[in-house]
Image (cartoon, rainbow, N blue to C red):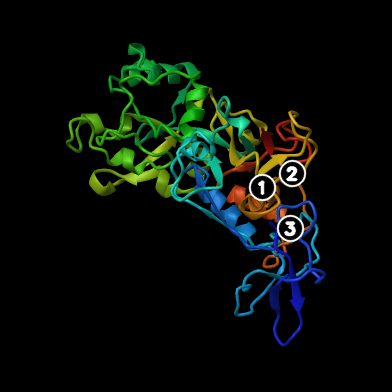
Amino acid sequence: MKLKFRVLTSSAVVVTGLLGAGLPAHAEPAGTGWDNNPDVVVGGGSDTTYNVMQRLETLYNGAPGCLVSTANDANKGLCAAPTAVTPDQGNFDHDLFVGAAPTGSSAGVNALLSTGAANRPAIAYARSSRGPNAGETNELTFWGYARDAIAVVSFGSRAGISLTQAQLVGIFTCNPAFDTWGEVLGTADTSPVIPWDMNSASGTRSSFVSFLGGVTFGSCVRKLTTGTAPFENDVKPVLADVGPDTAAGTADDDENNYIWWMSYGAWVTYPYVKNAGTGPGNAGPVVNSNLVSVGGTLPSAANINSGTYPIVRTVYHVTKNVDVDCAGAAGSTCGTGPETVGSDTGVGGAVREFTEFLCRPTTTAVNPITGVNYRTEVIRALNAEGFQQIPTASGLRTAGYACQIQT
């Protein structure tokens, strides 16, 4: 039930519960998820989109909204008086969005599904760097808000190489014809090719495997000596690993022979995740990761936008359908945005409004600190983390939205 409040005028603003019939009350903006109450809303899942979502959550948390009561009573922090807003302006309830530590895209998505185990802490939306798997859109909507590339990387002295999709398939399926770098590159080099695996819940892993045609990795694909696969987008655990013989600095942990992959957004933004020292604790000289040309092309902002790099993917904000869905008749695809349908109270309503904030192609709302339009602020946040907005001319956007929506 929505709570309604009336405003009493005195030396300070005080909000009092609506205790009797006929007392005046102000209503939240019609047709929205706002209900005059600030909710704390937690999201979780992807490692790849953890940092960019923190930027976007912070933007929304600071967006203008209702006048807040400062009275020292039970109403402190609630909306004290109506504020002249239209649905595209800011964060009316002053809801607070926070991101839980990464567990992987699939782990976040599964936590939202009725069949999935709950997340700790409980989450109300998921971060995902992969699209929906079969059946997931029966309960969930995937709001694709940005584009990224999968960067294939080599290390150390192994720089300037180019590989085809077929060569990558051969390497990661452990085809004997691709055992050495000489066999892969057509040289006399007898150094072994050492491919590395990645956290099984990772959307970045899922995207790469999809590019390879859904292959199953072979037994030569390396995991850490702990027996677990490394998390994505940070080469330090890979380069610090001592290899199967558990002795540092021997042939089986020669980083010059490693090959891996990661988010291009992370690679281009954070030098410390793409380069590292060698040996225990990453001590020693810095080892650089090097972009591998895939099909003759290196990833860049330009070819992410044009879709001409071979491994481009959409990253997603994922919600429960009951909380927020794109407008449309039952059983249909989306109607014309940018408004949505779904919850109009509580955490679900808060998720609905945050989703519209991410996917609204234009807005009249201006950041009161910077004076910059919030759509521009969203694009700047994406670019600051190496991502690109869904291109307007790509045909990927759902009509009326700045997002690619799968529901």
The CA distance from mark 3 to mark 1 is 17 Å
> Foreground residue, 299 or 63?
63
Bin the neighbour count of mark 3 within 10 Å (Cα to Cα): few under 14, some 14-19, many 20 and up. some
Please tell me which of labels 3 and 1 falls first in the chain.
Answer: 1
Question: Quadrant of the image for the N terminus?
Answer: bottom right
- Image: 136 above or below 14: above
Q: Are marks 1 and 2 in contact (CB under 8 Å)?
A: yes
The numbered mark at residue 340 is 2
In the picture shown, does residue 244 fall above or below 287?
A: above
> Badge 1, how many Cα within 10 Å: few under 14, some, many 20+?
many
Q: Position of residue 354 (x, y in %)?
A: 66, 51
Q: Quick one: label 2, few (<14), some, or many (20+) residues within 10 Å?
A: many
Helix, strand or loop at disc 1? Answer: helix
Residue at image mark 1: 355
* Residue positioned most to the bottom: 11
Q: Which mark is residue 373?
A: 3
Viewer-nearest of labels 3 and 2? Answer: 2
Is label 3 in a helix, a strand or a loop?
loop
Instruction: Determine if residue 23 is in view.
Output: yes
The residue depicted at 78 percent of the width and 62 percent of the height is 27
**Considering the numbered disc 2 on the image, is that residue within a helix, a strand or a loop?**
strand
In the image, what residue occupies the spot 74% across and 58% down? 373
Q: Position of residue 343 (x, y in %)?
A: 69, 48
